Structure formats: structure tokens, C-alpha cells
Image (spheres, helix red, strand yellow):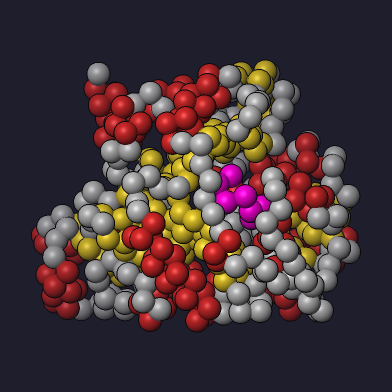
Amino acid sequence: MPETLEHSAAAGHRFDTVLIANRGEIAARIQRACRELGLKTVAICSEADREAPYGSTADSFLCIGPSTAAKSYLNQHAIILTARLAGAGAIHPGYGFLSENAAFADAVEKAGLVFIGPTASSIAIMGDKISAKRAMMAAGVPCVPGPDTALPDDPATIERIALEIGYPIIIKAAGGGGGRGMRVVPKADLLHEAIALTREEARKAFGSPSLYMEKFLEHPRHIEIQVICDDHGNALWLGHRDCSMQRRHQKVVEEAPAAGIAPDIIQPVGLACVKACLQIGYRGVGTFEFLYEDGAFYFIEMNTRLQVEHPVTEMTSGVDIVQAQIRVAQGHVLDLIQGDVTCEGHSFECRINAEDPESFLPSAGVVTHLALPAGPGIRVDTHIHAGYKVSPYYDSLIAKLIVHAPTRAEAMARMREALAGTEVEGISTNIPFLRALFEDGAFARGETDIHYLEQWLKLRRAA
């Protein structure tokens, strides 16, 4: 990938060894970026991941706990202690696990290490959906209709807020994420039951019963804007993605750029995101997520970390986002100015999961055969190989298949060929499902929204 960022180092952030506090394909991806930057790596694992292939290419590979994530990849004390004992100067959290945990970011910094990500205060502000919405409104970022305060306990006040917004509305956990802690309420007589159920779910899943309410948009697309910021007052947005192809609020296919959105419509939103970053003193990479309907954008949340779908932006912008993220953490200056950021061609990413393609139930076991596509405009991010044992303990993502081509139609054709050349045996995967999806006419024409995939699946099951 061509280099498009130049840097000058600032004192006080230098490190030559990075502990990768994650597993799977993202651990392998971060390790590759570190090697290309001349940095040493410390890979960690649970007992279930002792045979992970990226362990053999790391400078150190250390087991930090049992198979369950709570006792290994979520064990903050063990991770920080391992980093110090192994001589690492920084910790990269990847995505998931501790990547958006403000307390962990703070603990890393207090231990004298560099957290490769935003400051704890930025994570806290943007991790709480209510404070994030307030910050975005202050920066002029358009938001979904609804108050920027938590819902009160008084039932009558809640009813009044819902009526002011107008049904249908959606109830969300303030500390939620990953598609959890939300309920759509189509009419008033279902409101209080939804509130009670979501409060309890939020309390159990996120440690806080705090909720907020917004207008439920019925046919929106899910559009993301990628940003990167340094510690020297520089911030850029690197283009936009469409992540509307979702099942149960989980992304399945992503693409960049989002088709059919004119530059004069998206540019003011991207610049508003940059302004918001500067106002809160944001550092590192991040993603602003929007709903887009009838030509209007509505902010829903910010992910203060590296995204699973970052490769499609890398392919279209020419920027190695993981390397840029690490260099920013080292104190380097972003010398690329906004006018230099371009979007070339079109890119798709398919998430290949170890799951049944019909029921979507996870599929653990040993990969007995693996064939991956190759060629111009094809990229595969994975950690698996023939003989690899897929564990039942973690997320089912085993690979990301990414393509790039001059146009959207050409990129779709390239993805069809790439999927046809992808073979995984010994376990079930969602590859047959992805192949069928890329043959769908409405998807090919760009006539989809965030509800389309669920409806498509219902029709397939009924056929």
C-alpha cells in the first residue's frame, strides 16, 4: 500500500515494543503493521489460543490466563503486568475486549505505558451515548431527533418525551454497543414495558440502567466516517463507508465509499466530525456512525477504536490506518492535509464467520482444508490455516475478505469471484450465505437499508 502519511516524532511518546492485547485476525493485523514500522511485538494468548499462528512470529508470546475471556483478554491487571515484564512500552487493544474501556486506558497510562488509542477522557465522553450526543450537537454534527439527556424515572414525563419525538421511537442504553441494549417502540401502549426490559438489560450488560430515547428512522442506511487525529491539533476524515448490510444489528458486509451520496452532501458532515474531534481533544483513530435517510445524516454514536471494517477505507484512501494509529500514539505529526485525502475506486469487505449459513449458530472445530483467493485487488485478513482449531470461547469471525476495483460494479464482480475461490472445510461458515447475497439484484443496485438483510433472510427462509 502506498505511503501517504509523513511524520515527525515528538518527545515523550517513543516506544519500540508493542503488546497486542487481542487475538485472532486483528492481532495478526496489528503485528504486521508493527513489523513494517520496525517495532517489536509481544503477543498474548489464553490457554485456548496457545497454537495461534501469530505467536510464532511475535518477539514474545505469553499465555496470560484460562480460555474464558474474562480471565484472559479482559484481565486488565494481567495484561499490564505482562507488558511491563516483557519490556513493552505501549499496548494496542485492537477492537472489542478492552478497546473502549476508559478505565483500562487510564490504567495503562498510569503504569507508564502508552495506550494506542484515545485518552481515557475521550473514551468516557464518547462511550456514553448521551454525553456523545451532547458533544456532537455542540460541534454542529446532526443528530437523531430526541433529547440529549437520560430518561427520567417518572412515567408521565417519559410518555411526554415520546409524544414530542413521535412514534415509532427507539429506547437505547446510554452505555450500550454492539447492537445490544435497544428496543423499538412502535406505539404508546408498549412504551413502559420496553423501558423496563431495556433498563434491566442495560444494568446487566453495561453496569448502568441509564437510557435515552430517539426517533426510530424506518428506512435509513448506516453510514460511517473514519477520522484520525494527532496530539498536535491536526484532524482528518478519510472518507466514508456504508455498513447497512446487518443481521441483528451486526455488520456482515461493508463497502467504501457509500454509493449514491454526493460529495457536497457528505463533505460538511465529515468536516463537522473533524471539528468535534478537535473540540474534545481526540487522539488516534475513530469512527462516527450515522443513519442516513432522505438526504439527511443523523449521528448515532462514535467508536473510539479501530473498526473491523477499516480495510475498505485503507483500500480506497491509500492510508494504512493501523500504522497511522501507532505513529500518532508515538507522538508523530500528521502531515497529510485534508485536501490531499482522496477516494480511489470502490471496496467491499465480507466478514467470514465460523457459523452455520442458515441458522447462524457458531461452529467450532478444526479447519481441515483452507483455500484463499489471491490476485489484483484481493486482500484477505485472517489468522487461520489448515489444522487451525476454531475455539467456541470467542467471536466467530475467522477472516475478512476484501476487494478493490475501479467501480462498484467491478468490485462486486471481483467479490463474487473471490468468494467462489474461498474454501473452508472442517467447520461450517457463512460463505454460502455471502455468495447468495452478492447475487441479489437490489444489493447490486444499491437499493438497500439497514433492515433489508433481515427481510431478505425472511424471504429466503419462506421460499
Q: Position of residue 72 (x, y in %)?
A: 70, 53
Which quadrant of the rendered structure holds the C terminus? top left
Q: Residue at x 75, y 67 (%)?
A: 7
Q: Residue at x 51, y 28 (%)?
A: 415
- Whether 418 is drawn above or below 68: the answer is above
Q: Quadrant of residue 445?
A: top left
Q: Position of residue 373 (x, y in %)?
A: 63, 24
Q: In the displayed structure, does residue 69 sit left or right of residue 202?
A: right
Q: Residue furthest front?
A: 339
In the rendered picture of this protein, how many numbered marks are placed on residues? Answer: 0
Q: Nearer the viewer, residue 35 or 406?
A: 406
Q: Position of residue 191 (x, y in %)?
A: 17, 62
Which quadrant of the rendered structure holds the N terminus? top right
Q: In the displayed structure, does residue 2 sit left or right of residue 440?
A: right
Residue 357: in magenta span: no
Q: Main secondary structure of the magenta part?
A: helix
- Whether 197 is drawn above or below 129: the answer is above
- Whether 391 is drawn above or below 323: the answer is above
Q: Position of residue 154 (x, y in %)?
A: 20, 78
Q: Nearer the viewer, residue 5 or 80?
A: 5
Residue 318: in magenta span: yes
Q: Residue at x 54, y 64 (%)?
A: 339
- For the record, the magenta segment spans 315-322
Q: Residue at x 44, y 65 (%)?
A: 270
Q: Is residue 221 visible?
A: yes
Q: Is residue 45 visible?
A: no
